[in-house]
Amino acid sequence: MIKHTRIPALLLFVALFFAACKDQDGPLPQPDPTLYERLGGVDAIALVVDKFLANVVADDAINARFAATVADPFRTQLLRNNLIDQICAGTGGPCQYKGKTMLEAHTGMNITDAEFNALVGDLVAALDFYNVPQQEQDELLAILGPMKSDIVGQ
């Protein structure tokens, strides 16, 4: 049983405890937004991918590589969806890439550095078209860049 002299001390302790907790209340720090969020989410990524594919089709340096894909609406849609999922997943979004690995997809194609660089240029042009800030462009290219060794010369 608590004695009457201890009750005020207990109440004082509880009051001080809650006052201390109240001072620490406030908004919790929010994590930095992911690259996916800074790019604008899946809808913005889809717009960039569509512009990118249009750039590739118009690019005489590499469009022959994509002629069979462009001629087949199913393959075109599959490529589009895979690109969206790959960028979405790679930038921290909720998508899951289900396509082939870059090595599986490009083995036997003997893609050159010049062709790879043209493709990257077409992507950068799409990013520029939608005014994607340089920092986000750099981060995206840093994510995609390491794939080069699985694409070029395979």
Image: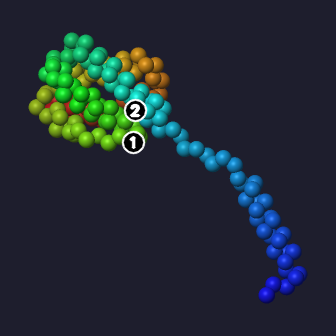
Q: Position of residue 80 (x, y in %)?
A: 27, 28
Task: State how far apart marks 1 and 2 are (Cα).
Answer: 9 Å
Residue at the far front in the pictured view? 73
Amino acid found under the numbered disc labelled 1: Pro
Residue at the far bottom in the pictured view? 1
Q: Which mark is residue 94?
A: 1
Indicate the quadrant where residue 94 lies. Answer: top left
**Residue labelled with disc 2:** 42
Residue at the far right in the pictured view? 5
Q: Position of residue 5 (x, y in %)?
A: 89, 81
Q: Is residue 137 visible?
A: yes
Is 141 in front, or is 23?
23
User: How many marks can you see?
Assistant: 2
Q: Is 78 rendered above or below residue 28? A: above
Quadrant for the N terminus in the image: bottom right
**In this rendering, position of residue 124 left or right of residue 25:** left
Quadrant for the C terminus in the image: top left
Q: Is 97 rendered above or below residue 55? A: below
Q: Is 93 rendered above or below residue 51? A: below
**In this rendering, position of residue 27 left or right of residue 150:** right
Q: Position of residue 11 (x, y in %)?
A: 83, 71
Marks 1,2: beta carbons within 8 A? yes
Q: Disc 1 or 2, which lies upstream in sequence?
A: 2
What secondary structure is found at the residue carrying circle 2?
helix
Q: Residue at coordinates 35% horizontally, 34% vertically from top-left?
A: 87
Q: Residue at coordinates 61% horizontally, 46% vertically from top-left?
A: 29
Q: Is residue 112 visible?
A: no
